[in-house]
Image: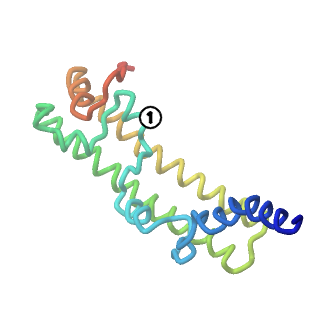
Amino acid sequence: MRAPITALFLSIAMAPHIVLAQGHAPYAGMETRTIKALSAQQIADLREGRGMGLALPAELNGYPGPMHVLEQADALQLSDAQRAGTRAIFETMRADARVLGERLIEQEAALDKLFASGTASDAALDTATSAIATTQAALRAAHLRAHIAQRTLLSEEQVKRYAALRGYGGTQHHRQ
């Protein structure tokens, strides 16, 4: 009688672990990526200079993004000068972001290679991750700077209208 009870107890106790082992594989499939830390979509976004949420502190605090301003140009009643200025801000940001995005892709590939080759060390890791962090900071700053520059081209009414068009309720917009 004791053996069947023990077996039953063990099977009940182990069931959650078996389920977790079978269903808990959040990185499954990622091992086939060219650069393990970046999805194909992230690589494409970096190459195209897309924002990827890097400028959310600006966007959600009353500093419109130039791409979205251009998308809403008619609704915002942009003047010809505002349209031209916005295009210039966007193109500058995009060019800078593409260069930085390519650099970040190369740096992530180098980090991946450290581990794939079995040559990772503390010193190599520190060098690689410091370079990546510097590039990530520069990339984020490029996107945020575009939002700062964009806000200077718009009236306070246009900033408020932009927030409404984007569906931001309750956002405070402070002119600096």
Is 161 located above or below residue 72 in the figure?
A: above
**Corner quadrant of residue 58:** top left
**Corner quadrant of residue 149:** top left
The residue under the point 65% across, 62% down is 20
* Location of the C terminus (image quadrant): top left
The residue under the point 15% across, 36% down is 81
Residue 32 location (% of width, % of height): 53, 78
The residue under the point 62% across, 58% down is 131
Q: How crowded is mark 1: few (under 14 residues within 10 Å), some or many (20 or more)?
A: few
Residue 110 location (% of width, % of height): 60, 71
Q: Residue furthest bottom?
A: 117
| Nearest the eye: 153 or 174 | 174
- Left or right: 2, with 153 as reference point: right
| Nearest the eye: 93 or 42 | 42
- Left or right: 60, with 162 as reference point: right
- Left or right: 97, with 75 as reference point: right
Residue 84 location (% of width, % of height): 17, 42
Residue at image mark 1: 57
